[in-house]
Amino acid sequence: MSSRNPPRLLDLAIQSVLQDEPSAIAALEWLPTQLFPPLFMAAVIGGHRETVKAMWHSQKTPLQISECRDKQRGSPRSLSRALPLSIHRSGLPLERLISMSSRNPPRLLDLAIQSVLQDENSAIAALEWLPTQLFPPLFMAAVVGGRRETVKAMVGCWPFIGLPLGALVKSGHSDQDILHAALDGFHVLLTQKLPPRRCRLRALDVRLDTDTNFWKVWSGNESIASVPSSEDPVTTQPRTRTQKGKDSRAGEKPQSSTSMVLLTDLRFLDTAPDELFTVLMERVKQGKDLPPLCCRKVEIVGGLSELPVIEKILNVVQRDAVQEVAFHCWWNLKSLNWFAPFLSQMGHLSTLHLSRISLDSLGSRTVDKVAKLLAKLTSHLLSLHQLQHLILETVFFLNDHLCQLLSCLPTTLESLTLKYCVPLDADLSSLHSCPSTRQLRSLDLSGMFRARSMRAYLPKLLERVSATLTHLSLTDCGINDSELTALQPALGHCSQLSTLLLGGNPVSMAVLQGLLQHTWPLCKFSLLGLPVPQDCYEDPEGFLHEDTFLEVIRQLRVTLQAYRPLSVSFVPSTCDRTWDEILLRMDS
């Protein structure tokens, strides 16, 4: 505490507490250590005999009575009767840290926070002296109550390394005004040469999927022990005092504003944009500066008409921190090249997802123009030395260009997804000859097998990756009995295969049994997604014959039970998946 007058926040809290003495006494066990001396002094001066007695018995911190007697209104004799004779009035040597409880939050904090938020100006003025333990509950109350100025001020003097605001947004305790306020407070920090004395904030985290118990711990719903060891303990534990009474972190230098970042995942969406994207766009249009953005994932959805605004947002993204980029938009190859320079600077990008990308908006380009556009794109992909996962879904510029795209990749892919594309023979041939596909662990060719030439090249590709492949999806490929039988030898060589998905293919029960009998002893299956055999349907309309289906399930159990225990379940078709499926899993 300071030698100045007590801060207004403590006055408000103490006034509220002493108006409800039973609640104050009940809350003493959870009262922050810093609040004991001023509360004890107020209780002595105000003659609150029961509070004085209870505080003395709590033995939480040394208490000196002599400091209070000059201002005491109650009689010394009355005060003496409140204290046991066995206690040395020179003080108690025991000090301990506050520990959070799994019980309900103490009433004292409720009283203090209610008083503070009724006088927002006094609350902001008192933040410099607010005990560290009160910052999280007060911030939560300010967010829930929509106290924009308090949120802004608290961000500017936040005494922890991280502020996981996104976890509160996820719980529905925020809106755009609060997000605006937090960004305004963060911007003030960034513009200062040195942050305030108490401020240790380095990362304002607005990610919705942040895995943190920070707010649960500080609201008293969980103990500090529940915090994952990977989290910085400074973000969850209060300041401690050394034996000399000095702050254990007082010697630390203030954190430079240049190392502060906004942790987020960016999702650019024209229709129904999320709160963060909306706030960032508004700041750009208002001419306000944007904070540095540290993103794991950048996702672009829709047409995106305001590319100049998006470009300004992308300019403040720390590109080296991006691990995943996804396009779910009807862009053409020219639009994709607009983004390509940003892509080339994402040195730690591990996942690239392209969906619904066409040649151009009119669908007509000369061979030379397409070659130039593709050459420009592939020149930027050459710098992606950490790329492990490539997903191409409904991409229409691949025809006769898949080899060019795969050959430019500087790394060996771990997973490759080609879904509902229309490749040519040259494209399919490249799958089993490109260096980037020689060690695939996951291969998804859903909808691709409908290209007849694919059936000649797939066995060669499976043979090439047989030592590493663990996941294979051939769903909705139109595979018939003869074609599935032809794939059996190649599948049997995939000794590490644990997941095989064949749903949506018109095959018979006899062929399925033959496939399982051949591959099950050779592979390491833990999950099989099988099509419901054609034998189970009564007519072309797709009505399932229940008795026949139950017999199929019984036969599957008999066929496979000899190898390993398993569970069998039926997954009916949905609007997104137009086929019934049988899932076979290993028992856990």
Image: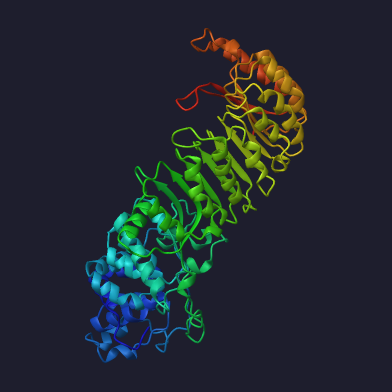
Indicate the quadrant where residue 186 lies. bottom left
**How many numbered circles does the render carry?**
0
Above or below for 547 versus 451 = above
Above or below for 209 versus 360 = below
Q: Is residue 50 visible?
A: no
Q: What residue sits 41% from the left and 41% below the top?
A: 302
Q: Is residue 403 left or right of residue 355?
A: right
Q: Is residue 463 left or right of residue 58?
A: right
Indicate the quadrant where residue 30 lies. bottom left
Outermost residue on the top side: it is 539
Q: What residue sits 60% from the left and 36% below the top?
A: 417
Above or below for 586 versus 240 = above
Q: Where residue 524 sits in the image (x, y, percent)?
A: 72, 33
Q: What residue sits 36% from the left and 71% below the top?
A: 188
Q: Where residue 545 sits in the image (x, y, percent)?
A: 53, 10
Q: Is residue 314 visible?
A: yes
Q: Quadrant of the N terminus?
A: bottom left
Above or below for 396 versus 544 = below
Nearer the observer, 386 or 63: 386
Q: Quadrant of the C terminus?
A: top right
Q: What residue sits 64% from the left and 13% below the top?
A: 508
Q: Where residue 527 sits in the image (x, y, percent)?
A: 64, 31
